[in-house]
Amino acid sequence: MQHAAEISAGDAADSKIERAKRQRDYFLQQTSAGAQLSATFKTGFDYGVSAAIALKPANVKKTFNTAAATIKYKLHLFLFSKIQSSYSF
């Protein structure tokens, strides 16, 4: 991307009006502050909705049960491997 100073430092043959038009075109390509804030708020809102859905009691219970089942499974695998290794000949 070009900087405005580079645009305005064009050829000496350029008239002030032509340079002003190039600067205007350059700055109109940039995202406006309002659009950027709007996108930021929309992203924040989406994160908030996702967090609210994840913290629903049914979802928390499901996540807890899944984590408990995973831990139980891994614990059994660990204990089985220890028992099996203690009986190796």
Image (cartoon, rainbow, N blue to C red):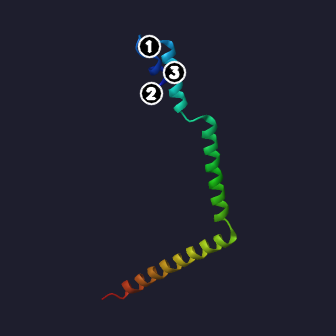
Q: Which residue is mark 1?
A: 14
Q: Which residue is mark 2?
A: 2
The residue at 50%/27% (across/down) is: 26
Snapshot quadrant of residue 49? bottom right
Q: Amino acid at mark 2?
A: Gln
Snapshot quadrant of residue 65? bottom right
- Give me the C-alpha separation between circle 3 and circle 2: 14 Å
Residue 38 or 68: which is nearer the viewer?
38
Q: Amino acid at mark 3?
A: Lys
Callout 3: SS: helix
Discs 1, 3 touching: Cβ within 8 Å: no
The N terminus: image quadrant:
top left
Mark sitting earlier along the chain (3/2)? 2
The residue at 40%/82% (across/down) is: 81
Residue 11 or 85: which is nearer the viewer?
11
- Indicate left or right for 46 with 83 as reference: right
Q: Position of residue 84 (x, y in %)?
A: 38, 86
Q: Amino acid at mark 1?
A: Asp
